């Protein structure tokens, strides 16, 4: 029997309180999918060493800046590298990422 490959998933979509505001963005469709697929929760911001809660951040040019002006580009880069390590280790081919997130996804649709 061939097993399905795991899918990388933004942890906040699975109900993990890891967002900048210490809350979650639980998504019912993602929770339903978790019943039939293996979803690997990741939070690049936490993996990059940031605390929860933390100031909100956005991409400005080639930098990531918190709302207070602090440059957190290196933390975001570290988190991205850590997620990439997990993806390679588990041979991830698909990911479900939080839309409009500076560390997970930039698109508008789930």
Image (cartoon, grey):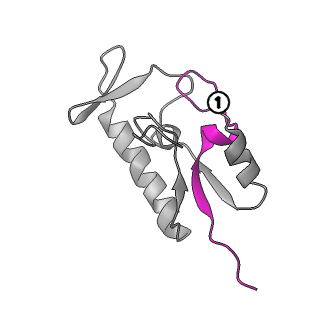
Direction right: furthest residue: 35
Expressed as whole percent of the image width and height from the top left, the position of residue 42 reads 57, 48
Expressed as whole percent of the image width and height from the top left, the position of residue 22 reads 61, 24
Which of the 4 image quadrants contains residue 102?
top left
Q: Is residue 94 above or below residue 53?
A: below
Query: Does the stretch in magenta take in 8?
Result: yes
Please give the name of the residue rendered at 44% of the width and 58% of the height, measured from the top-left corner. Answer: 84
Which image quarter is the N terminus in?
Answer: bottom right
Expressed as whole percent of the image width and height from the top left, the position of residue 54 reads 50, 22
Direction bottom: furthest residue: 1
Depth order, front residue of 71/98: 98
Query: Does the stretch in magenta take in 98?
Result: no
Direction front: furthest residue: 109
Please give the name of the residue rendered at 51% of the width and 67% of the height, measured from the top-left corner. Answer: 93
- The majority secondary structure of the magenta stretch comes to loop
Which of the 4 image quadrants contains residue 34?
bottom right
Please give the name of the residue rendered at 43% of the width and 42% of the height, measured from the top-left corner. Answer: 105
Give the magenta part as a residue range. Answer: 1-25
Expressed as whole percent of the image width and height from the top left, the position of residue 67 reads 36, 16
Q: Secondary structure at mark 1?
A: loop
**What residue is disc 1 on?**
24
Direction top: furthest residue: 68
How many numbered tags mark residues here?
Answer: 1
Few, some or many C-alpha atoms within 10 Å of disc 1 (few <14, some 14-19, many ≥20)? some
Q: Is residue 90 left or right of residue 2?
A: left
Depth order, front residue of 42/104: 104
Q: Is residue 20 above or below residue 37?
A: above
Please give the name of the residue rendered at 50% of the width and 62% of the height, measured from the top-left corner. Answer: 87
Q: Is residue 24 above or below residue 37?
A: above
């Amino acid at each position: 029997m061939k097993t399905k490959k795991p899918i990388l998933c933004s942890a906040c979509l699975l109900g993990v309180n890891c967002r900048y505001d210490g809350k979650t963005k639980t998504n019912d469709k993602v929770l339903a999918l978790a019943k039939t697929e293996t979803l690997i929760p990741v939070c690049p911001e936490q993996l990059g060493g940031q605390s929860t809660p933390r100031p909100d951040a956005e991409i400005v040019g080639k930098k990531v800046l918190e709302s207070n002006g602090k440059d957190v580009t290196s933390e975001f880069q570290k988190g991205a590298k850590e997620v990439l390590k997990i993806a390679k280790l588990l041979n991830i081919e698909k990911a479900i990422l939080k839309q409009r997130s500076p560390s997970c996804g930039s698109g508008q649709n789930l």
